[in-house]
Amino acid sequence: MAAGPLRRHQLTISTTKKLLGATVAAGVIFALAGCGQAPTESGDGGGDAASDFLPCLISDAGGWNDKSFNQSAKEGMDRAADELGVKPLEFESANDNDYAPNLETAVSEGCSLIVAVGFKLSAATVESALANPEIDYAIIDDYADNDFDGTTDAPNIKPLVFDTAQAAYLGGYAAAGWSAEAGVNKVGTFGGMQIPSVAVFMDGFQLGVDKYNEDKGGAVELFGWDIATQKGSFTGGFDANDTAKQTAQGVLDQGVDVILPVGGPIYQSAAAAIADSGKDTLLVGVDSDLAVADETVADVTLFSIMKAIDVAVEDATIAASEGDFDPAPYIGTLENEGVKLSGFGSFEGELPDGLLDEIAALQEQIIAGDITVDSENSP
């Protein structure tokens, strides 16, 4: 998919043709906290990176253990560090006020590559990159285009973005098929902040539900999002708190049997709301394979809509270490394995007959360009 005009806060993301055929049939498709403290060092060494190469990572609020984009980015950085034989500096931001100070500390520590995790770091990352043109930067889920002129605001920033709508389309189709088979015909979603990197999941999810209804003559309803009006249910942040639980409960009250929480840790609030309800509603994870990342919710996670943040960070880090840093945006798609659907775990045997093959066929059509997943929030 062509990148199109660059827009602020737009993200994009890893599954491929390897997920088709027999693999699909097997069910597989688919710094220390706060500033002012010394950053965490990780990695055991043993690679051949230049001795002066120092990669650094700065988290969004939510921390390294969010089971989502922060954790995935850290895993990618740590893998690269192990391969290169270097010890990265990793700065965990406790809140939005930590972004600029953490960037300043990374610069003062002599970082060669600074990876910022998330669109909320965009303004601070641009400011730091413009002031330090000799340093390479990368940012996840954002184009760093804060003046909206269609280009990244600093020539030394590489956007790592993902066309998540493609994988979410498959997820919406799968969720609709599950709900229709159960005779419920209701699925739902809610998000953290209403930003493109969140809404892109919800757009794709709705389009997938619509596709299922079109192909099957179904009547599955989606609650919590309307792609036409771009309005829906949001918590206003990415914290697993009472607001997130109440927002999840509002969607659950519509009678849905599948719910997609888009926003890192807010899945925890959705799981708590499901437990309180006593119903059999299932979760859809985002970013990482939630059933693997958090075993406490594995028994209520139907599948996950994933993006390979870890791979993008790992590749960007290794390239920078070799002097091959390229600021051109990376856009993750189904074709390049930047986005994908996870497997269905213990629920695979309960799927409607033929659903896996239908999802595989849809994936092939998206990769071939026969189906365009049209989301205004895509990169």
Image (cartoon, helix red, strand yellow):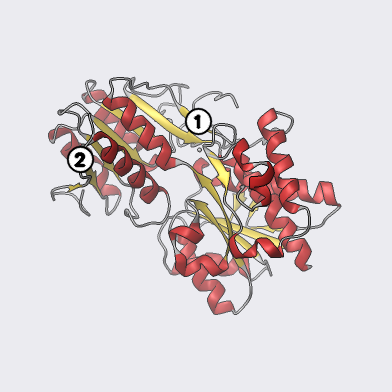
Quarter in which the N terminus is drawn: top right
Above-or-below relation of 71 to 327: below
Which residue type carries mark 2?
A: Gly
Residue corresponding to mark 1 = 331
Q: Secondary structure at mark 2?
A: loop
* One can see residue 103 in this view: yes
**Quarter where residue 371 is shown:** top right
Front-lying residue, 208 or 248: 208
Residue 126, given in percent of the width and then of the height, sits at 31, 29
Residue corresponding to mark 2 = 45
Residue 229, given in percent of the width and then of the height, sits at 66, 45
Front-lying residue, 88 or 101: 88
Above-or-below relation of 195 to 192: above
Residue in the image at 79% along x and 67% along y: 183
At label 1, counting other C-alpha atoms closer than 10 Å, the crowd grade (few under 14, some 14-19, many 20 or more) is many
Q: Secondary structure at mark 1?
A: strand
Mark closest to the chain's N terminus, 1 or 2:
2
Residue in the image at 49% along x and 72% along y: 272
Left or right of residue 70: residue 376: right
Which residue type carries mark 1?
A: Ile
